[in-house]
Image (cartoon, rainbow, N blue to C red):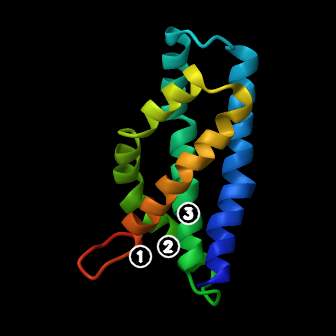
Amino acid sequence: YNPYQTFAAGICYGALFFTPLMHNVFAFWTRFLPSNSMHAVVFKTGIDCVTSFPVNVSALIAFQTLARKESSSTNLQKFQSIQNSLQLNLWPTLIMGWKIWPAVTVLNYKFVPVIYRVLLLNSVSYCWNVALIFYTIPSKSSQRVQ
């Protein structure tokens, strides 16, 4: 168990980045496109998949990379590590996520009351993030996350 990794990946990403961002995304859609017609749901899902999802995946990869780095690493080494991790993992992770998240997002916008939408995303994200952590852990035969 590493408390620093838990703090960086769990608290910094989950509580301080992901949840507030998703709260604001849902508040925006509730204000500007409150309809849950299928046309509106598909539109919101499409916009989310090409805007907030890539931002979230990039942030998750960056926080995971920082959590795995030695505290003695220089800021330049940490930045280069994040850059390398994003180059290696961003597209494969986005492609994998685009197979899962559009369905979750459609269900969320169509059937879940506004006050529970972030809770649903956090619940699914927990499983998604655990899977990503294992996906991005470097193995002896892989070049993922340096």
Could you say which quadrant of the image residue 29 lies in? top right
Disc 3 target residue:
62
Q: What separation in Å lies between label 1 and label 2 (alpha carbons)?
A: 7 Å
The first of marks 3 and 2 along the sequence is 3
Q: 108 or 84, which is in the foreground? A: 108
- Give how far across and how far down residue 4 sits, in percent: 67, 80
The residue sitting at 67% across, 14% down in the picture is 33
The residue furthest bottom is: 72
The first of marks 1 and 3 along the sequence is 3
- Tell me the SS state at disc 3: helix
Residue 146, labelled with which disc?
A: 1
Disc 2 target residue:
81
Asked if residue 84 is positioned above or below residue 40 in the image, the reply reads below
Q: Which amino acid does label 1 sit on?
A: Gln
The first of marks 1 and 2 along the sequence is 2
- Give how far across and how far down residue 60 sits, in percent: 55, 58
Q: 74 or 31, which is in the foreground? A: 31
Other residues around mark 3 within 10 Å, as few (<14) / some (14–19) / many (≥20): many
Residue 37, labelled with which disc?
A: none
In the rendered image, the quadrant that contains the C terminus is bottom left
The residue furthest left is: 141
